[in-house]
Amino acid sequence: MKEDNKSMESKITPLLATLREQKEMNMKGGIYHKTQIDLTYNSNHIEGSHLTHYQTRYIFETNTIGVNTGDTGMKMSNLARTFLAIAK
């Protein structure tokens, strides 16, 4: 049976609560931080990005792009915003 969006929004799982809490705290090294980096790295890798996992993490941790990435930075920025919206 398919649930409507209203009832889905009212269910806050322990994982979602943890993600939201870590996001608000801007916690580094937690499940939110790791998931954000891993999803971005894998998505960009599928699209042909040559950034390493380390470079992807560096971008999130410093909010800067220190490598020649072409339009990869824009793609990463869009994916980061999408991830933030999911955790709301």
Image (cartoon, rainbow, N blue to C red):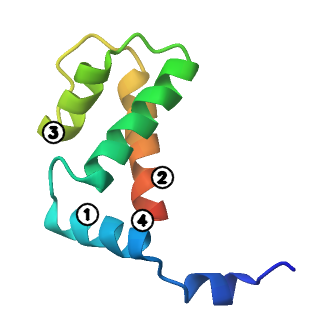
Residue ID at (36%, 76%): 17
- Dot label at residue 87: 4
Amino acid identity at mark 3: Glu
- Binning the other alpha carbons within 10 Å of mark 4 as few (below 14), some (14 to 19) or many (20 upward) gives some
- Binning the other alpha carbons within 10 Å of mark 2 as few (below 14), some (14 to 19) or many (20 upward) gives few
- What residue is disc 1 on? 23
What whole-number distance in Å separates the C-alpha atoms at marks 2 and 1? 14 Å
- Dot label at residue 82: 2
Give the answer, above or below, for where 12 lies relative to 32: below
Q: Nearer the viewer, residue 10 or 76?
A: 10
Q: Where in the figure is residue 72, as x and y percent of width and height?
A: 41, 22
- What residue is disc 3 on? 61
Q: Secondary structure at mark 4?
A: loop
Residue ID at (30%, 53%): 31
Answer whether labels 1 and 4 touch (C-beta < 8 Å): yes
Instruction: Report the label total.
Output: 4
Tell me which label, 1 or 3, sits earlier in the chain.
1
In which quadrant will I find the C terminus? Answer: bottom left
Q: Secondary structure at mark 1?
A: helix
Q: Where in the figure is residue 28, as x and y percent of width and height?
A: 15, 49
Tell me which label, 2 or 1, sits earlier in the chain.
1
In which quadrant will I find the N terminus? Answer: bottom right
When asked about the image quadrant of residue 22, the answer is bottom left
Answer whether labels 1 and 3 touch (C-beta < 8 Å): no
